[in-house]
Amino acid sequence: MNIHEYQGKALLKEFGAPVSRGVAIFSAEEAEAAAKELGGPLWVVKSQIHAGGRGKGKFKEADAGEKGGVRLAKSIDEVKEFASQMLGKTLVTVQTGEDGKQVNRLYIEDGSDIEKEFYLSALVDRATGRVAFVVSTEGGMDIEQVAHDTPEKIHTITVDPATGAMPHHGRAVAKALGLSGDLAKQANDLTIKLYNAFVSKDMEMLEINPLIVTTDGKLRCLDAKVSFDSNALYRHPDVQELRDLTEEDAKEIEASKYDLAYIALDGTIGCMVNGAGLAMATLDIIKLYGEEPANFLDVGGGASEEKVTAAFKIITADPNVKGILVNIFGGIMKCDVIARGVIAAVKAVGLQVPLVVRLEGTNVEEGKQIIRESGLNVIPADDLDDAAQKIVSAVRGG
C-alpha cells in the first residue's frame, strides 16, 4: 500500500526525522489559509499523487499552467493561483503512463534554502534478507539512471536484524555522502530513526529524494515516498486509515475485498489462475503467442465458489478484455469448485467474449462435466499451450 508524500512526512516526523512544515489542502479555497499559516516568504505547492516525477510532469489541461506538478510560489497570490490551476487536473509523469492521475489534494510546504541534495532509501534486500540503506550523492535525480551511468556513486549499507541500526551504520551512511562533523552526527541520528520507522511500520520501501543539506547546515527530508507490506497492515490500523482509494484501480479495490491477488494490466486477454507461478507462466505464454494479458489474477489455493465468482466479475468489468482464459491446476483448489464459480459468474454477468477453460488436477472430471452440462459456449483446452493458442485465436476472430 502506498501513501502520499505529506502522509509519509507526518509519519517520519513521529519518529523524529526532520521534515519541513506543511499543510495538506483539498480545495483551492483552502490555499490562502494554508499559505498564511506557514508564513512564507517561499512556499512549495506540490501535487499529491502516487507517482514519481511530479516536478517534471505535465498537466493534460491547457488551463493548468506549464510549470509541472511541483511549483515554487513567491507570494500568497501565487499559491492561490497554482492551487486553482492544479487541483482537479490530470498530471502525467514518467510513472503514471499516458492516462496520468487526477490531482485531488495538494501539499503546501515551506520553501527550503538548499546547499546540497542527496538520495537515501531503505528497502528489503532480498539477496541478504536484511533491510538495506541505499544512498548516493546524486540526489534529486533519477536513481535508475544514476545506477546505469555511474554505479560507483550508489552505496548499499545492510542492517543485521539481530542488532538493528547501530552507530556504525549511520557513520557508513555519512561517509558515503561525504558528510563530516555535525552533519555526520545528524546523518547517524537520521539513519537510526528511519530504520526504526521502517521496521516499526512494516514498510516495504522508504525513499527520500532529495535528502538535503540546508544553507544553515541542517539535514532535512525534502520528499518522502513510502509503501507498506500489505500483508502486515492488520497490525497497523493507523496506516490503513491513510489509504487513498482514488489512487487505486477500482478492480484492484474490489479484488482486495475478496483477498484476491489482482493486478490490472494493459492487454486484452483476462486471466484467472490459481497459484502465482502458474499465473506468471500463463501471462508469459499469452505474450509468446503474440497477445497481451489484461491482468494478473491468482484466486489462491483455497478459493470458494463466491471468491471465484467475484474474480470472474472483476475480469469481465474490464472493457479492454476481448477474451478470457481460465487456467486451473487443482491441488488444494478443486476443479469442480472453479467450474461452479465460473458458471455462476457467467449467469450473473453474461458472457460477451470468448472463454477458454483449462482444468487439471483434483476433481478434474467433475469440473469438466459441470462445464459441459452448463450449456455455456466454452472452449475446452487440454493443456496450457493448447489453451493459450485457442484464446489468442479466439480474440483474433479465429
Image: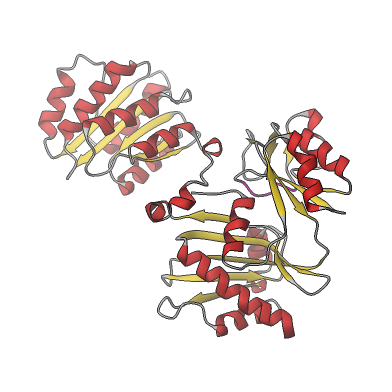
- The C terminus appears in which quarter of the rendering? top left
Magenta span: helix, strand or loop, mainly?
loop
Quarter assignment of residue 79: top right
Task: Evaluate whether residue 111 shows in this view.
Answer: yes
Q: Residue at x 18, y 17 (%)?
A: 374
Q: Is residue 181 above or below residue 157?
A: below
Q: Residue at x 65, y 49 (%)?
A: 52
**Residue 149 placed where, x, y %?**
68, 64
**Residue 355 placed where, x, y %?**
31, 23
Q: Residue at x 15, y 27 (%)?
A: 368
Q: Is residue 157 above or below residue 291?
A: below
Q: Does the magenta-highlighted stretch encompass residue 53?
A: yes
In the rendered structure, which segment of residues is drawn in magenta?
51-55
Left-right relation of 246 to 162: right
Q: Residue at x 18, y 22 (%)?
A: 371
**How many tags in the picture?**
0
Task: Evaluate whether residue 294 shows in this view.
Answer: no
Quarter assignment of residue 262: top left
Left-right relation of 337 to 115: left
Quarter assignment of residue 351: top left
Q: Nearer the viewer, residue 235 or 128?
A: 235
**Residue 244 placed where, x, y %?**
54, 41
Q: Is residue 369 above or below residue 64?
A: above
Left-right relation of 150 to 271: right
**Residue 340 placed where, x, y %?**
19, 26
Q: Nearer the viewer, residue 93 or 240?
A: 240
Left-right relation of 232 to 49: left
